[in-house]
Image (spheres, rainbow, N blue to C red):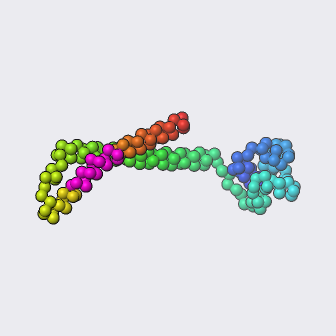
Amino acid sequence: MLNENMKAIRKSKGLSQQELAVKLNVVRQTISKWEQGLSVPDSDMLIAISEALETPVSTLLGENVKESEVDDLKAISAKLEVINLQLAQRKNTGKRILHWLLIALCVIIAATFAILLELESPYLGWDYNDPETAVLGAAFHSFEWLFVRAAPIILIALILFLTGSIRRFRDGVWRRS
């Protein structure tokens, strides 16, 4: 039981027989004999083995320890790779959605600006003595002010934001390659 547990724990820690032998100040053949069950380490050496493998002595002497197989590690690696790809895809999708939403907003602002420019502010000729007309005229005036005066500033800010985002994304992709 000791031999099987020692071998399984050593492999699960990613140590070769030689590396364990160096840690214990013995030759590799000694480790091989212990793992084959041809000899048994003394109590002091058993404590040293438990320290080198970072495992309690009771575990070394106790029940069988399942040997971690390389296939298990490959399966875990494959799952992690799939998860990383999904996260990257989700992040890129979010960026693409934000990118197109900002472009759509810019197009809407530009179209509204063009329409208001073409109409030449018809509300300016209205009679503001009627309260309903006054409220509607004030709403149109604030709407026009937003799109005529603030739209160019918003558009420039969005363009700067998009070009900065694109540059950061491009730089990030280039660094990985």
Residue at 83% in and 57% down? 47
Q: Which residues are magenta?
A: 140-154
Percent x, y of residue 35: 78, 49
Percent position of residue 2, x then y: 78, 55
Residue 14 in view, yes or no: yes
Seen in the picture, residue 96 relative to 55 is either above or below; the reply is above
Residue 42 located left or right of residue 78:
right
- Is the N terminus in the top left, top right, bottom left or bottom right quadrant? bottom right
Residue 174 at x, y percent in the picture: 51, 35
Reply above or below: 170 against 75: above
**Residue positioned 24% across, 47% down in the render:** 112
Q: Left or right? Give the position of 48 relative to 147.
A: right
Q: Residue shown at 71%/50% (left/top)? A: 13
> In which quadrant of the rendered view does residue 58 lie?
bottom right
Magenta stretch: dominant secondary structure: helix
- What is the count of numbered marks? 0
**Residue 33 seen from this side:** no
Residue 165: x %, y % from top left? 44, 42
Q: Is residue 148 magenta?
A: yes
